[in-house]
Image (tube, rainbow, N blue to C red):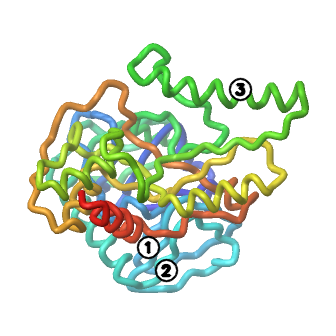
């Protein structure tokens, strides 16, 4: 599973374009099974990738990089640990070399592959994929498949670009129930830039992605405080939709460090601050329930209108301009947050 902003040598005719979440193209025998996984609704149920979701590159026989290459997400190899050309790789994530994390991710990936294969083909596939656009589903063929042009993998979903760089202007409904919230952030940036350009006001713009930690309000509606308070109270944990929508959660200490570095810099364009490692809402609910040692059940409820399916920052600008990235693992951040809630007698 590879996601990179640099094409591999000899792969110029294979261009992955448009919006896509995760694509697995495993070859077996003389045939091909291609699975597209999307956070958006599709003709088939999205296949969860488990712990493999956070990996941009997951290899079993080593990695050879001709670089320079930038990837957003974790990098892992198992059981082979060889990474040729590692000096030319900028990875906005953790580097796992033959460890238990990578082994678990590979196991989850095999499970996802088998699950998708078990669903059977959902769309016809032609012998030559050149010029085709494949949407979420499972495709297989008993014969060899050719590729003589561009293949577009379109997983759909919201937002239209994933992960979201600072150059992405958004895809929001201005008159929906989230309209005031969404548009207030956009207009705030517009006001700030006008004051900088017209009046010379010193401006720094941080685009803060999902953040959590101690001292959050019990009932502010966000996932972490909701799941924690429900788990500690022994009440059902409320998960909306089918739980496959993802968020990227940054611990508050990391965010504050990023803000301090931004304020001390000379960079005046927007900067994403967040953790690029995604987790599904169902996975998050299970993690918090286990960390709280709770017997709460998980209760599924309808997905709210205009609720984003995916939220994940591209933090390459923060890494380049501020030498910043999120350091606190999700599990550790949750442990600290839950400990604070327990200390409040809640």
Q: Mark 3: few, some, or many residues within 10 Å (few <14, many ≥20)?
A: few
Query: Compared to 64, does 183 lie above or below?
Result: above
Classify mark 2: helix, strand or loop. loop
Could you tell me how far apart the alpha carbons at marks 3 and 2 are, in whole angstroms? 46 Å
Residues 97 and 325: in front is 325
Q: Which residue is mark 2?
A: 62
Residue 336's spot in the image, x, y percent?
A: 38, 68
Q: Which residue is mark 1?
A: 59
Classify mark 3: helix, strand or loop. helix
Q: Mark 2: few, some, or many residues within 10 Å (few <14, many ≥20)?
A: some
Residues 90 and 333: in front is 333
Q: Quadrant of residue 165?
A: top right
Task: Locate the N terminus by quadrant.
Answer: bottom left
* Contact between labelled residues 2 and 1, with CB atoms less than 8 Å apart: yes
Classify mark 1: helix, strand or loop. strand
Task: Locate the C terminus by quadrant.
Answer: bottom left
Could you tell me how far apart the alpha carbons at marks 1 and 3 are, in whole angstroms? 43 Å
Mark seen at residue 330? none
Q: Mark 1: few, some, or many residues within 10 Å (few <14, many ≥20)?
A: many
* Contact between labelled residues 3 and 1, with CB atoms less than 8 Å apart: no
Residue 315's spot in the image, x, y percent?
A: 61, 54
Query: Compared to 77, does 252 lie above or below?
Result: above
Q: Would you say residue 9 is visible in this rendering?
A: no
Q: Which residue is mark 3?
A: 190
* Residue 199 horizontal side relative to residue 155, left or right: right
Identify the mark nearer the N-term, 1 or 3.
Answer: 1
The residue depicted at 9 percent of the width and 53 percent of the height is 297
């Amino acid at each position: 599973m590879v996601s990179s902003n640099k094409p591999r040598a000899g792969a110029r005719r294979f261009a992955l374009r448009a919006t896509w979440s995760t694509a697995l193209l495993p070859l077996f025998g003389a045939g091909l099974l291609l699975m597209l996984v999307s956070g958006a609704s599709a003709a088939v149920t999205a296949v969860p990738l488990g712990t493999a979701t956070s990996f941009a590159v997951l290899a079993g026989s080593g990695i050879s990089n001709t670089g320079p290459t930038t990837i957003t997400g974790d990098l892992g190899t198992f059981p082979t640990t060889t990474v040729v050309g590692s000096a030319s790789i900028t990875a906005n994530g953790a580097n796992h070399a033959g460890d238990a994390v990578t082994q678990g991710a590979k196991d989850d990936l095999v499970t996802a592959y088998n699950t998708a294969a078990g669903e059977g083909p959902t769309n016809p596939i032609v012998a030559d994929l050149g010029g085709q656009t494949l949407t979420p589903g499972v495709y297989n063929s008993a014969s060899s498949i050719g590729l003589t042009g561009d293949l577009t993998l379109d997983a759909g979903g919201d937002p239209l670009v994933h992960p979201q760089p600072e150059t992405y202007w958004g895809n929001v409904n201005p008159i929906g129930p989230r309209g005031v919230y969404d548009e207030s952030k956009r207009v705030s940036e517009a006001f700030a830039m006008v004051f900088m350009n017209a009046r010379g006001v010193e401006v720094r713009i941080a685009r803060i992605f999902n953040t959590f930690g101690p001292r959050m309000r019990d009932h502010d509606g966000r996932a972490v405080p909701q799941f924690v308070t429900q788990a500690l109270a022994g009440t059902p944990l409320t998960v909306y939709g089918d739980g496959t929508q993802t968020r990227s959660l940054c611990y508050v200490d990391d965010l504050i460090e990023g803000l301090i570095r931004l304020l001390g810099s000379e960079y005046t364009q927007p900067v994403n601050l967040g953790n690029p490692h995604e987790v599904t809402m169902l996975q998050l609910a299970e993690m918090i329930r286990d960390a709280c040692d709770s017997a709460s059940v998980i209760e599924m409820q309808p997905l709210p209108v205009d609720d984003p399916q995916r939220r994940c920052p591209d933090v390459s600008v923060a890494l380049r301009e501020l030498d910043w990235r999120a350091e606190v693992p999700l599990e550790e951040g949750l442990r600290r947050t839950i400990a604070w809630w327990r200390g409040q007698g809640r």
